Image: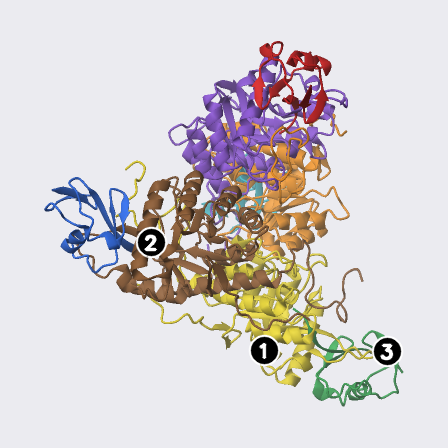
Chain colours: A brown, B yellow, C orange, D purple, E cyan, F green, G blue, H red
Amino acid sequence: MTTTETAAVEPMSLAGRTFNSRLFVGTGKYPDHATMTAALDASGAEVITVAVRRERLYNEQGESLLDAIDTSRYTILPNTAGCFDPEDAVRVSRLGREILEQMGNPGASWVKLEVLGDKKTLLPDPTGTLEACKTLVADGFQVLCYSSDDPIAALRLKEAGAASVMPAGSPIGSGQGILNPANIVLILDLLKEHDPTYPVIVDAGVGTASDVTLAMELGADGVLLNTGIAHAQDPVRMAHAMRHALDAGLLAYRSGRIAKRKYASASSPWEGVIAHIPGE
Amino acid sequence: MTTTETAAVEPMSLAGRTFNSRLFVGTGKYPDHATMTAALDASGAEVITVAVRRERLYNEQGESLLDAIDTSRYTILPNTAGCFDPEDAVRVSRLGREILEQMGNPGASWVKLEVLGDKKTLLPDPTGTLEACKTLVADGFQVLCYSSDDPIAALRLKEAGAASVMPAGSPIGSGQGILNPANIVLILDLLKEHDPTYPVIVDAGVGTASDVTLAMELGADGVLLNTGIAHAQDPVRMAHAMRHALDAGLLAYRSGRIAKRKYASASSPWEGVIAHIPGE
Amino acid sequence: MTTTETAAVEPMSLAGRTFNSRLFVGTGKYPDHATMTAALDASGAEVITVAVRRERLYNEQGESLLDAIDTSRYTILPNTAGCFDPEDAVRVSRLGREILEQMGNPGASWVKLEVLGDKKTLLPDPTGTLEACKTLVADGFQVLCYSSDDPIAALRLKEAGAASVMPAGSPIGSGQGILNPANIVLILDLLKEHDPTYPVIVDAGVGTASDVTLAMELGADGVLLNTGIAHAQDPVRMAHAMRHALDAGLLAYRSGRIAKRKYASASSPWEGVIAHIPGE
Amino acid sequence: MTTTETAAVEPMSLAGRTFNSRLFVGTGKYPDHATMTAALDASGAEVITVAVRRERLYNEQGESLLDAIDTSRYTILPNTAGCFDPEDAVRVSRLGREILEQMGNPGASWVKLEVLGDKKTLLPDPTGTLEACKTLVADGFQVLCYSSDDPIAALRLKEAGAASVMPAGSPIGSGQGILNPANIVLILDLLKEHDPTYPVIVDAGVGTASDVTLAMELGADGVLLNTGIAHAQDPVRMAHAMRHALDAGLLAYRSGRIAKRKYASASSPWEGVIAHIPGE
Amino acid sequence: MQIIVNGAPEEHPDGLSISDLLHAHNLSAVPCAVEVNKNLVRKPQHDEHTLQEGDTVEIVSLVGGG
Amino acid sequence: MQIIVNGAPEEHPDGLSISDLLHAHNLSAVPCAVEVNKNLVRKPQHDEHTLQEGDTVEIVSLVGGG
Amino acid sequence: MQIIVNGAPEEHPDGLSISDLLHAHNLSAVPCAVEVNKNLVRKPQHDEHTLQEGDTVEIVSLVGGG
Amino acid sequence: MQIIVNGAPEEHPDGLSISDLLHAHNLSAVPCAVEVNKNLVRKPQHDEHTLQEGDTVEIVSLVGGG
């Protein structure tokens, strides 16, 4: 008999720290701060992403993001969204670190590295991302590195010292889910081959809960998403959905699913049937 | 702004009764009774299916199913598994009712109707199922009716008075999940057209958690499964997974997911970017 | 060494006759008769479907279908499209036979039987189709029977004497292709189990050439389509495409495709490589 | 009305030359030379790929590849298979050119560039491929460049001067077909945006005919494959299948396929139906 | 007498045969089939079959279809 | 007399009621249902229903199933 | 002197430190980071770092992003 | 002198040209390419290029590949 003491989802190790939640959520695109904070809470996330942007010097904008969020509660992960070359991504990474150090936030040495290749797809530039990753690792950053789902591109980022490689399921904000599960599996194979706890986080493209469940069932360590919650009609409820979806996928992955069979396999016994069975 | 007071999943109405859980689980194929009862508990199910079989008159079999289960806790839904013609299915339905009436179980007037067409696929015979459904409805049964995913076959069963139509995602025990989501959507369209609360439960073929999430995201009212839990390497953990998966899918369906887009949509604002953006 | 004398596609036996083409095309929805006849020619079809409709008694309509087509060239297969109950389908079948007998066309005893279940999906009613099929077989028809992709519904039609069962890939005219290849495979398994030459023709839903190729690769004996050609922007060119697609699929099915592998298998030899191979 | 004078497939321009066939086939893995030459003939290919390997100095090997093939008939495209770093790929490219120049073959300045990243997946290394591509373009080569299906990796190779970018549908020899059609479409969008005749050839992963048809329907200019033919049970027949499949896909792409619809669209007219139509 | 032909009422003299009706509609030479009150009347019977007041007649031919 | 119970022949004295049969198999206290010649005999009739030579009896209960 | 701050020209007196600039924009107490000519100037240097004619300054903070 | 040819050591007299080496291996008439110490030596130089002790030579041709 196989039993389980508990359905608890084991914590995840990332960049030297431990997290109970494997869901990483963005803070962009919410209709308002109240919805955002309620959705962050509902998601159970412990790490949230933010962008680094110019202060608006002349027009007042009301409450700032940092006023809205209880920053003591979250590891704040600054991204380099909007950067198309490695130099800009390194500059933005350092600016983000500078702010988070002032705040004493544990995300200070972390960066979600994006070096984009194209404005229509927002897919990463493999060579530019690799170059920026190397520079940032040398500069002491914990680099959580956005990648395409190209297995070799992902492997090179791990080799360059990324704390986590984060392959896209599909283009950012596209809601297409995981277009190529086989590539995610190859990434997991290559990056975890001699390093089974190396964290791989599926980032980008999640549209709905089943995308998250699938990512975890493939063996990913976590999922990062933003638009799928923020632009849902009911973001807070969708945040709950995503949290359940992640637990569902992780538990299912750990449970050893049944193999797929072409034909049926009866759930009820044939023995003791009182009906006429054809051919018997 | 859209908010949600709670992430509670609304109850489901079925055959005149109300259930908090939308997961219906079988009791077959478990390695032992202790694993089964722990898995039933973990699943959160309120309705469980059983089969009607000959008493073993001569060889003692230890603890019976009814000894193992706290029958006061569950609605027990007897099935007609193993029946290949409508007459046998009607006989078995009446035998199941007879036993459950003795027990005072609320499942006494319910039956999970299966009239199978073939031993390899265990897919239902559309004409035989329809005939048995009519007879059982006339005899006062609440018929929860196993169907293929053929939309017209499903519609005819509803018209015949089935309390719920339960289309197969794929063959019983095959673990192939939902092979034709478009057909499930057509079934939901046809059966709920003027009757939006009519319950449609995806039954059969579920292999892992994301199958359940997908079923609910399509708009199903519930999911019935057995092998996906009972034959997982860790059935109890998988039962937890399935429960989360159902909540994830239902919440996501209610949340209004984002539309799929071909191209990306940035999560972070373009305004205030300090990096060089190509073409700008 | 395996060689092939020729790439010729073997003829198909259907309802006691032999055809070189396995593509069956409809004559509806063309922009004009000239496009239709050119498309029929390009398709290579030997059997074409037509509908039975009221003569327009008062408003002249120019050239009729039978004037436009060289009827000596084709087996004309009348359908029962538009019929929703078995009685009407039988009436229409007999009317079609009456006309084709007057013409001396070999399709006179043939019918493409459709008994529809619903106007939105135009999917067949399984019970009504089965009843009409039995009546028409008893009346001497060669019944080419439109079915859903429900394997048992298809099997019952064969057992009732249908000359061919023709499962839908997806709803008529929807262009969704083959939504559930696994069901087509189950149909082929069940219907050909002890009768390997029994003809199964995929009918309905074809949108483009690869749908036809896939149908044949699954093991179907032929494909019937109409809208995919008639409503393409260039119907004649699409008819050529469909003809190539059918040959491609049939030849591939007969060629024994390679198995799918998770990992790569080099096309060029490793032996004699002058480059440095990692780990060697 | 749209008509077509002919079903002829228009020729393809590649590296300054024009080809009637868009199918590019390898010469590896055949059971024997006779099967290979028959398959090459059946495929209709005008360009065939070869590998550069050490002469076997001591053990005689019978007829060589160049003895078996009528080299005057084909453009011979040497590959850099087996190279894992850009320096080796450049060496091998130059060696191939040296041989083909001696033979006076038009493939002398051409190379199928592969810089592999990993032995299990044989997927390309994006950075190494880009570096080798730049070197070879500067050295006067026409570089037909194997790429992953990462849209930005592909775009960078075009920008580096590749004569064609050749994205993998799936790993070499895996027979998995095109795992991510959306990425192929993005590649076509990005590479053809201001240059619609830029040739994109799907290379690797083709298992059967419908994979080729699909590639062309997505808008690819051609397909390169080897194992799908060479390891089929009947390679010559499969070569015929692949040729038909390519024509089918190209013609279908040029024909403007029908849009997919959720619901049905009747092929036969509703007007003049003599049957009872529900609701009318 | 009045009969219904292809869904529309028509006035015809008593004693009208199916052949007469087809002739009246210029359909004598056209491949078509005729049903009276939902029963097929085959071509050899067209001359002798006399239509009655209130009969419902369907005259059908083949059109483009799929 | 001989009857068939759950597929196997059994010898019993004439006049055997269903209740007697269940008692003989130690099933009196167990939730089960009984069919004679494919017709359900409900529990309140178990005492009075006398089995006949050649009857086919099915005694069923509930087991794990899906 | 003129400097470029967040993309727009500003006039300031000579000898302006970064701290002065932040003060002028009411940003002294706000978590932000400052770059001069694409080089980060960390907070402890804000008092002592004197801006020069033509400097390009970026003052950034954190906003919602994904 | 010893040289490495296609991965294996070979003994040859000093002053050996590439043409000599190809001749020794019966490859004079075969389409092939030669690399010495990872540098291609094109065919017109085969007569004049004299190999040195310790040279690594690759002689390659075309084989079936994809």
| Left or right: D177 in relation to B273 | right
Q: Nearer the viewer, residue D90 or D30?
A: D90
The amino acid sitting under disc 2 is Arg
- Give the residue furthest to the left: G13
- To the question of a shared chain for discs 3 and 2, the answer is no
- The answer for which chain carries disc 1 is B
Q: Chain of mark 2?
A: A
**C69 lies above or below B220:** above
User: Are dots 3 and 1 in contact, CB under 8 Å?
Assistant: no
Give the mark count: 3
Q: Amino acid at mark 1?
A: Thr
Q: Residue furthest bottom?
A: F47
Q: Residue at x 88, y 85 (%)?
A: F12
Q: Quadrant of the N terminus of chain D?
A: top left
Residue drawn 48% across the image and 52% down it: C120
Label 3: state its secondary structure. loop
Q: Are marks 1 and 2 on the same chain?
A: no
Q: SS class of the residue under badge 1?
A: strand
Quickly name the residue at label 1. Answer: B75
Residue density around tag 3, few if under 14, some if 14–19, many if 20 or more, within 10 Å: few
Residue B112 x, y percent position in the rendering: 62, 70
Q: Which residue is mark 3?
A: F54
Tag 3 and tag 2, C-beta contact below 8 Å: no
Q: Chain of mark 3?
A: F
- Residue picked out by circle 2: A97
Relative vertical location of residue D12 with respect to residue B23 in this rendering, above or below: above
